[in-house]
Amino acid sequence: MKTRVLTVAEMVAADRLTIDRGTPGIDLMRCAGRACAHAIIRRFDRVNVLVLCGPGNNGGDGLVIAKALEDEGRSVTVSLLVSPDKLSGDARLAYEDWIQSSQTPVLAAFDSCLLEGAELIVDAVFGSGLARDVGSPVMEVIAAANASSVPIISVDIPSGIDGDNGQISGSAFEANLTVTFFRKKPGHLLFPGRGRCGEVEVADIGIPDDVIEDLSPQAGENDPEAWIENFPWPRLEAHKYARGHTVVVSGGVSATGAARLAALSALRAGSGLVTVASPASAVIVNASQLTSVMVRGFGDLDGFMDVAGDARLNSFVIGPGNGVGEATRARVLHLLSLKRSIVLDADALTSFAEDPNELFDALHEKAVLTPHAGEFDRLFPDLKGVAKHEAARQAAKRTGAVVVLKGADTVIARPDGQILINANAPATLATAGSGDVLAGLIAGLMAQGMNGFDAASAGVWIHGEAASLFGAGLISEDLPDLVPVVLDLLSDPGQDAAAGWGANT
């Protein structure tokens, strides 16, 4: 799969496997450098190029880039962080290629004065090979480059970004373009690293796709490729009862909007029927606002259990607007005891902050948790400070449930360690109620038989695409009506998004 994401160690292993099959390492380096040069040439017509080269293979890539750009008529200045006699392996071979073919000497200097007159900066300093915080003089060069208006192209990943978790190691380039090789790394997708990469291009450098089978990576980028084969498209012979029945638990009379958002989203996702289970005091409020969604009232816990007991109800959302406390805890535990598909969000999670194990002991494989960072920290305080994707992975393993750790770089994790990192969410999703919409999308897909991990991944992606289609000024009420547009595009990727939107609005 093209969407697989490799750790730094896995990428090193992919290189090694390719070399072991007979491809010399210098050939991979030359392919990588030329791919970067071609990406630069396609996008930039700047003539004066400064190539900053580090001591390892990333610096070797930079030397190949310098040679390719000079061959295309660019004026190239190369600065090497270390003395050339300290280069070894393929980087040394790349250096020898440069000195044999170029009249321009490699500069030993590595300081911000080099930026004077540069129209383009190539960052080939460390890439993902950095094992410590950036120090002088690289830090000063990074600061000066970032402060300039000169475009920066990073090789592999902006130097200073940890390729495994996206964290900044002291200082990092802010690239306009990052060219990486074979597959992305977590640092390209997780913030803050993702915010430093600019456009990311993945170049083919001759590593065979089938080495993925030997690596068995556990991470991927959330993309329809990962779940589209299991997507529950409506069948002509099916009826509404065959497409599942989702129940969304509402809050009290002053907190009903979240449940309605989730309910409409579940219906738009394809759930055949959707019911809002509402406290008796809020029935009239919900009923007056809903048409295609049914409303059923309940009083005490026994009444709630009567509503939920119908075996035809196969998917639940509980938490949004429900209130934090014993009543919500009791309803959550009852729903979990039914062993049906369930999405737990917001108050359904925070209600267990005092005793998370009470929730964990009741969870099962059909449960999906959708916390934002604050809710996650209340349930997993020992995972504070752990890299986001690893924290989500550990949480899923601990609970036996699917965990959707939300944010600009939402991570979807399942108990066996597999994760998907989402990268299509626009900034406009940071608006009240958007999480309620997501909960409904996931539950609606689960109602139709999609497993929790695939439903969560598809829901997160559809959520992001819908927001991107709308653009500026988005509020959560806009999202459900855009779901059909995204589904149309999924079923026929060749459609024009704007045309599809017009046809569905």
Image: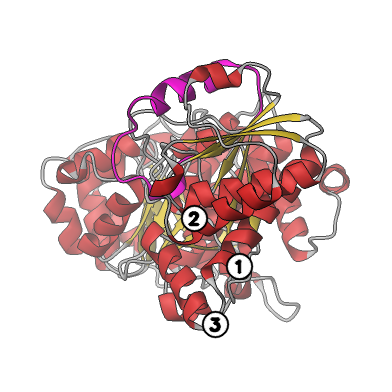
Q: Are marks 2 and 3 in contact (CB under 8 Å)?
A: no
Amino acid type of disc 1?
A: Asp
Q: Is residue 179 left or right of residue 112?
A: right
Question: Earlier along the polypeptide chain: callout 2 or callout 3?
Answer: 3
Examine the rendering and report whether any part of residue 314 can be seen. no
> What residue did someone put label 3 on?
22
Residue 149: within the magenta? yes
Element under disc 2? helix
Q: Residues within 10 Å of mark 2 (few under 14, many from 20)?
A: many
For marks 1 and 3, the one nearer the N-term is 3
Above or below for 485 versus 77: below
Q: Please report whichever mark, 1 or 2, sits nearer to the chain's N-terminal start.
A: 1
* Boundaries of the magenta span: 125-151
Q: CA distance from mark 2 to mark 3?
A: 20 Å
Residue at numbered disc 2: 92
* Rendering coords of residue 264 (x, y %): 59, 47
**Between 295 and 243, the one nearer to me in the picture:** 243
How busy is the neighbourhood of tag 1: few (under 14 within 10 Å), some, or many (20 plus)? Answer: some
Q: Position of residue 459 (x, y in %)?
A: 54, 54
Could you tell me which secondary element the residue under label 1 belongs to? helix
Tell me the quarter of the image containing the C terminus.
top right
Task: Look at discs 1 and 2 and give the one toward the viewer.
Answer: 2
Compute the Cα span from label 1 to label 3.
Answer: 10 Å
The CA distance from mark 1 to mark 2 is 13 Å
The residue tagged 1 is 27
Up the image or down, 40 lies above or below 151; here it is: below
Above/below status of 337 relative to 323: below
Total numbered labels placed on residues in the image: 3
| 131 left or right, relative to 361 | right
